[in-house]
Amino acid sequence: MDASRAAGVEGRHTTDRARPPEGAPDASADHRPAGPADTGSADAPDPDRAATAGAVGPSGSVEAAPAGTAGTAGTAGTAGAAGPADDAEATTDASGASAAPHLRRLLDLLAGDAPAEALGAVTGQARAAGVGGADLAETERAVATALRVRSSLRAHRRRELELAALFDTAGDLAASRDLDEVLKAIVRRARMLLGTDTAYLTLPDEDAGDTYMRVTDGSVSPVFQNLRLELGEGLGGLVAQTTRPYATPDYRTDDRFRHTRNINAGVFEEGLVAILGVPLLLGSVHGGDRKVIGVLFAADRTPRAFSPDEVALLSSLAAHAAIAIDTARALHDTRAALAELAEVNALVRAHAAAVQRAEEAHDRLTDLVLRGGGVRDVAAAVAGLLDGALTVHDPGGRPLAAVRHDGGPFAADSMDAGWLVSAAEESRAAARAVARSGRWICAVLAGQELLAIMVLHRRDPLEDADRRMFERAGVVTGLLMLLRRTVAETENRVRGELVTDLLTDAGRNPALLAERGRRLGVDLDRPHLVLVADTAADARDRLSSAVVRHLFGSPGGSASAEHAGAFVLLVSAEGAQAPDQAARAAAVQLGHLTGAPVTVAAAGPASGPSAIADAHAEAVRCLRALHVLGRHGDGASAGQLGFLGVVLGDAKDVGGFVSGTLGPLLEYDARRGTELVRTLAAYFAAGGSLTRAKTALHVHVNTVVQRLDRIEALLGADWNHPDRALELQLALRLQQLHL
């Protein structure tokens, strides 16, 4: 073998043998270690051949004979002496020099891992030294054997290096726990082990139904780095479908796989020519059920035939990579599952804490109700639990309770009643608390009946648990209000008997009526408004229930009864609205609760059984006047209608109108013996002239002025206004006629 051929063995195993078929052939067949059949007799000189050019010295080397001595060498003795022929080693032939030194040099070069060129040069050196014939042929065979041995040794060393690198790679992959780091390490080691320009890895996208470029090393093209491949396309598609390695020395001219414009654009922009792809497989080799989880590639930008060893090496790396990827994914999934479990556990703990908090809140609210707590007590507890001010309103929007989170009072009058009722309807329709304008509104219901409206004044959003707690507080409030309504209905039935007796015969025993009232919590000696309400016959039963519900939110000391075909409501006048306003508000709310128009008339305030009875008569007269005027479903007071109540109402109640209009003057005259009523009549009769009035009364003009000042103090500053003056004149005339 010449030196140039020996040098060819030094490179990568790209020999002149035919390229193997697709797949990964057995690489070990190309690197068999030299055996006895390969070395033959060239491994050592023939011990039976005699040396002719020198003698063996003490060190075993061949030494040249001194001049003039015999040309043969003996086994022992002085220089130049001839020994027996059968005791000497034959190292030369009859016509040439000894080959032994060259053979020993060949062994030294082989042991020293000399280049192939140095080994090949031994044959020329032996020829130049005069070795010829059979010895020269033997030397040539020895050189050829040495070159094969050298090539085999280098192949083994290279395989050891590759295995060491593969083991290092396996160790690195096993040590890595991050999937991205694992993938980058795989591609980087593939490029390093095969010495290619680039390496890359594609993975399947199960959601998109294609494969994509996951990691690259040595790539310079963004198009290539972002390449996506449909299943079965390109060299990678062929590898994935057949689960076998494929290599192409020139991608552009290889038609064994399907080219697409998309893939070609990326490959050509990257400048790749030679490409080797191997599958990443999971599953048993013998089980037959192996899954391709990706394809690992190594590629050069120049033509190149990948050797079976390189195919086997990349396949081995792919096997380790598949396991590492599967392990990293499993670890990632495990970590994700643990994180999800921790999150779920936290949610469960939070839910359990919320449930426990809700149970404690429910127990606290229930305990409040059982201990006789009122709506304000419940509101204060809920406000503290939810860290916000809380107000409770009746169905018409009027506040029943208002408290801050610290238990202090809270101003609840700033909210528009219409807005509040609209929000309550939204809560009723949604069957849950709703947020509006930085407030949370919850309708307090009994079935579909709106009992009250709870408002939590808090801009921060409510967690689901807190929202449910707020809604549960609404349920507790509803139960409390139903309980209190039941009690109120029972009390009202007893109080209704008092009202009936009061209206039937107030003058029979006023003191006894007052005492009964005090025992029932109704102080008749304190000022009260008297409201009389009626509706259509088919809605009377609903109005009866509505009256009780209307009084439920009223201040203490209220009572009601059905009397003379109408419903009478006795309401404390302390802190209440004016009679006309109270009548209109009652008409609206009672109409809403009844679902039909309700007409309401009001009179008072009045104190004492007799005065309350007179106020009732006045309210009845006002109610009749409203019906005559066609104001059904409206509300008004007797004072608001004035003399029209007498003109349009029951003429039998002239005394009630007179006492209601002139009552303060009549009482003053009766107590003091004065003539205020006579003075007022004379003043009106004189057309408002003080001079004519004092003449008719036979008093000084200053006396008339003083009496008129007293009248103004008793009747009010508007006594001389046209409307009021007309009522007073009518009352004076009726008094004269009635008397």
Image: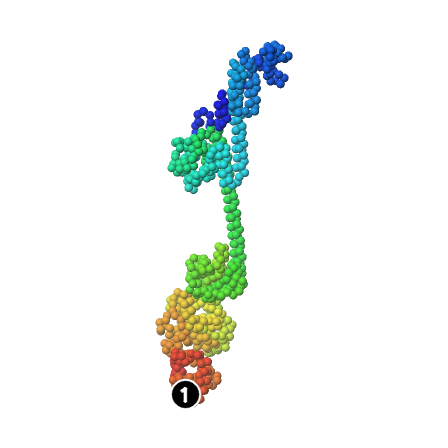
Q: Is residue 701 above or below residue 386?
A: below
Residue for badge 1: 691
- Between 397 and 92, the one lying in front of the other is 92
Left or right side of 345 for 694: left
**Which residue is outermost to the front?**
67
Determine which quarter of the picture holds residue 246: top left
Q: Is residue 100 above or below residue 296?
A: above
- Between 33 and 240, the one lying in front of the other is 33
User: Could you say where residue 369 lies in the image, as x and y percent from the top left?
Assistant: 52, 62
Q: Residues within 10 Å of mark 1 (few under 14, many from 20)?
A: some
Left or right side of 497 for 537: left
**Residue type at the position of mark 1:** Thr
| Residue 19 visible in rendering | yes
The residue lying at 51 percent from left, 75 percent from top is: 515
The quarter of the image holding the C terminus is bottom left
**Which residue is outermost to the right?**
78
User: Could you say where residue 326 lies in the image, as x and y percent from the top left?
Assistant: 49, 38
User: Could you say where residue 349 lies in the image, as x and y percent from the top left?
Assistant: 53, 51
Q: Is residue 35 above or below residue 564?
A: above
Q: How many marks?
A: 1
The residue lying at 45 percent from left, 38 percent from top is: 220
Determine which quarter of the picture holds residue 636: bottom left
User: Could you say where residue 661 lies in the image, as x and y percent from the top left?
Assistant: 42, 79
| Residue 40 visible in rendering | no
- Between 482 and 334, the one lying in front of the other is 334
* SS of the residue under disc 1: helix
- What colour scheme does the image use? rainbow
